[in-house]
Image (cartoon, rainbow, N blue to C red):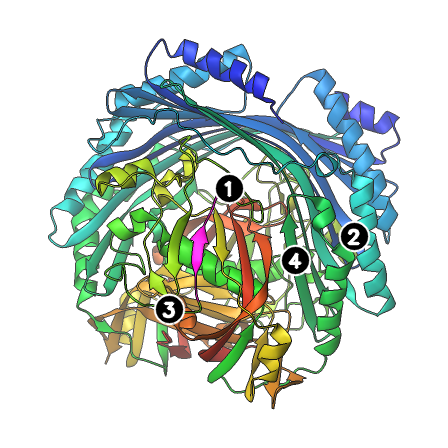
Amino acid sequence: MIEEKEARKISDAILKRCMGNPAEITIMSNDAALTRFANNIIHQNVAERDAEVTLRYFIGKQIGTASTNRLDEAGLDKLVERAKTNAKTSPEDPNYPGLPEPETYQHVTAWDQHTAEFSPEKRARAVGAVCQIALEKGLNASGALSTGSGGLVVANTEGVFTYHTQTNADFQTVVMSNDSSGRAQESAWKVDDLAVEALGKEAIETAQRGHNPVKIDPGEYTVILEHYVTEDLISSLNFYGMGAQALQEGRSWMNDRLGQQLMSPLVSIWDDGSDVLGSPLPFDFEGVPKQRVDIVKKGVVMGPVYDRYTGAKMGKPSTGHATPINFRGFGPLAMNLFMAPGEVGVEDMIASTKKGLYINRFWYTRLVHPRDCVMTGMTRDGVFMIEDGEVAYPVKNLRYTMPYVQVLANVDAVGKASHLLVGDFGGIGVRVPALKVRGFNFTGSTV
Amino acid sequence: MHALDQAQSRGAQYADVRVVNNRTESISVKDGIVEELSSSETEGVGVRVLVNGSWGFASSRNLTTDEIDHITSQAMDIAHASGLVSGEKVDLGPKVTSQGTYQTPLKIDPFSVPLEDKLALLLKADAEMGKVQGVRTRQAHATVIKEHKQFANTEGAFTEQTIFETGGGIQATAVGGSEIQVRSYPNAFARQQVTGGWEAMLSWDLPGNGQRVASEAVALLTADPCPSNITTSLILGGSQLALQVHESCGHPTELDRVYGSEAAYAGTSFLTTEKLGTFHYGSPVVNLTADSVRPLGLGTFGWDDEGVPAQSSPLVKDGLFVGYLMSRETAAKLGRFSNGCMRASGWNRIPIIRMVNVSLEPGTWKFDDLIADTDDGIYMESNRSWSIDDKRYNFQFGTEVGYEIKHGKMGRLLRNCTYTGITPEFWNSCDAVCNADHWVMWGTPNCGKGQPSQVAHTGHGAAPARFRNVKVGVLK
């Protein structure tokens, strides 16, 4: 990982090469390791060390971008030359709002030296414990334990220099028998906050309860959705409509609904880059401090997150949600999302259900139609029929096609515990509870 | 070679090393404004070692001798840790000693084309879309890639290859009331991609298709919805069929999935090994091939990332399931030889089994004859959404556009088209595949798999084909 002193040296070297032209630099560095297991053995075990510099070079409102992980003199020369050439070639962008000036941002501690130095042997012993329990139960465990550290620097010719480092850890496992499976996952910035063995046991117990699943008719059911499902709901709503660009292009589920009661009053969703209960990042990829943004408050649509570009178009300030430059086409995104927990345990949700389905996880979810964020996907790794307040029997996997807006409108209860999950895309953190939802429609089932 | 010597001297029974340099240039135009004009370069080295039958891998952007020593040592330590939770010792089968160089055949080096010319092409296509009233968002995009890769292993292999890719496309989005409709060209999500030079981009004639694409997006706003929850004959256009092949044939024939290596992430496969040579995957008109030699395919190269030479092998022959996509390790386990499907997305990733070019071989039908032969059905084209279960059985796809077929003629335009099915039932319902005149090598440059995640670029040749008794129109 690149330390602050070295980062300043690199950014100064690049800005010097820009000869006083407006410019913006981001430096992303990471040391990452991941131990992967399947069939109760470690089969893939990897580490990487990388650092990438991205330069935006401005000639008036002409913008050129280049990036490289070659940080030697020749590499930086080429970086500046390419960004400059691209800027000269590019026509002016009349909407470009200019570079931000320095602002004070809240430093956030999300660094744990123990996590940064976690060895392959420690990872092996942690996953080995889960494999051993699965083996003893006659089950097949797969999954991955990852640990690492990363840093982000944003600097520009207006004097912005922001620096943040973070450690990260994630454990996920799928445990299978011949006819059932279970899954558990948790993310944290301290590896010791991951209860690896307990998560393994959670997946094992789900797999053990799932033997001899019954094929049921698709149709409408009340569902108890584990927090793994809630993560998919919130992340999908983020990708397809929490950013101002989607709103400006008329393809967000928020369009024409700002200020309206669109979801259950039990639903509140916000983004807070400084909250260490998530995956914090106190500033965005333009170096703008992140604001806490209410996206849905007690079911009412409050508004999207902005970067400088989309904010300027609507006369709004940036909320600090610019994405990395190579993802700028997506527009701004929420990066550290929270859904408010409720007061009910999952057991109570089950106990209060006359007939319904408990669902551990959604899988391969994809957008079918953007307006209401209509998504299709499958259940996976644990579906159970609930009858008269008790888990009755396991069920074969089902396909659904549902507007996620409607799913959150139909929330009857919210779990009291929330869990952090960090997705593959851009390290976006989502801390979410379980949900009880009425009227969830399934359209098919699998073999 | 230094890394290999180090690994062997420290007790590795096998090691390989890849040094990769990747240059990518991306240009995006949105509504007449240049949204992105970027050049990126990434390079680094990855060392993979096998120690006492267990794997370790480490990688770095830094190509100095000291750093290569460091990552080799790190890979060895990791392999020793893997040995703490190990099973059967890895068997790689016969040695691989490939030698040689390879470069993608091309006419116009995409990096030699002036940026101004590339930009002008996209702005012209954007302007053509802009001539159509009612389009909300217009996008035009180009990506060119040059990847130089050196591979060596402790068995004596040394290969060097340079792969060029060219990709791009256009997309128009129309919004009316609560309806949002998209049309793309030449492929869904405005991204057809091939191995080859800038000549591919010119052949697609993006400006010449701009107005048509934009007009179709606008027309879709007021088109009738796809009939709901009916069973009918379905004819899929080539690009949609390419994705159908990718998801329901390519992925389930990956032998690492079958052996459970991807169980926790990408999933497993219904095509278990006892089905090999006995299972009727599709009807007799269904022939599927894996190759890494066909022109333009994103899976076309000289050698895979284990040094196994490019080749062609059948997966499904006359409907019968006969082959897998394999690595050295999984092939040895099955008693076969690798057919060269190990690919890493970059220097910082291990090779895993990936699709090369997985294609549906052409049939005998002319497209017009196929429509004329269909009394009642729907034609669907250009993917809009895709989803399939973890064993690759139950799928649901949505397309940008559909047309009703009545009495052998294409009729009214249909919006929000979807279809769903179970993989072997679906392929066994295939009764007609169009001929080589309609066959195109499509590119899928966004295939995700592996942990840490890897994005692979895969090729899929396909011509339109007909499927009987398919459930369509599932939107809610």
Residue at image x 69%, y 37%?
A112
Q: Which part of the image, by quadrant, shows the C terminus of chain B?
A: bottom left
Query: Which comes sooner in the sequence, label 1 or label 4?
Result: 4
Gap in angstroms between the C-alphas marked 3 and 4:
27 Å
SS state under label 2: helix
Q: Position of residue B157 (x, y in %)?
A: 72, 31
Quarter residue A214 falls in: bottom right
Could you confirm whether marks 4 and 2 are on the same chain? yes
Q: Which part of the image, by quadrant, shows the N terminus of chain B?
A: top right
Q: Residues within 10 Å of mark 2 (few under 14, many from 20)?
A: many
Q: Position of residue A225 (x, y in %)?
A: 55, 71
Residue at image x 43%, y 36%?
A284
Vertical position of residue B212 compared to residue B402: above or below:
above
Gap in angstroms between the C-alphas marked 2 and 3:
40 Å
- Could you say which disc has been placed on residue A274 in the image? 1
Please state which amino acid type lies under the numbered disc 3: Met
Front residue (pair B101, B395) = B395
SS state under label 1: loop
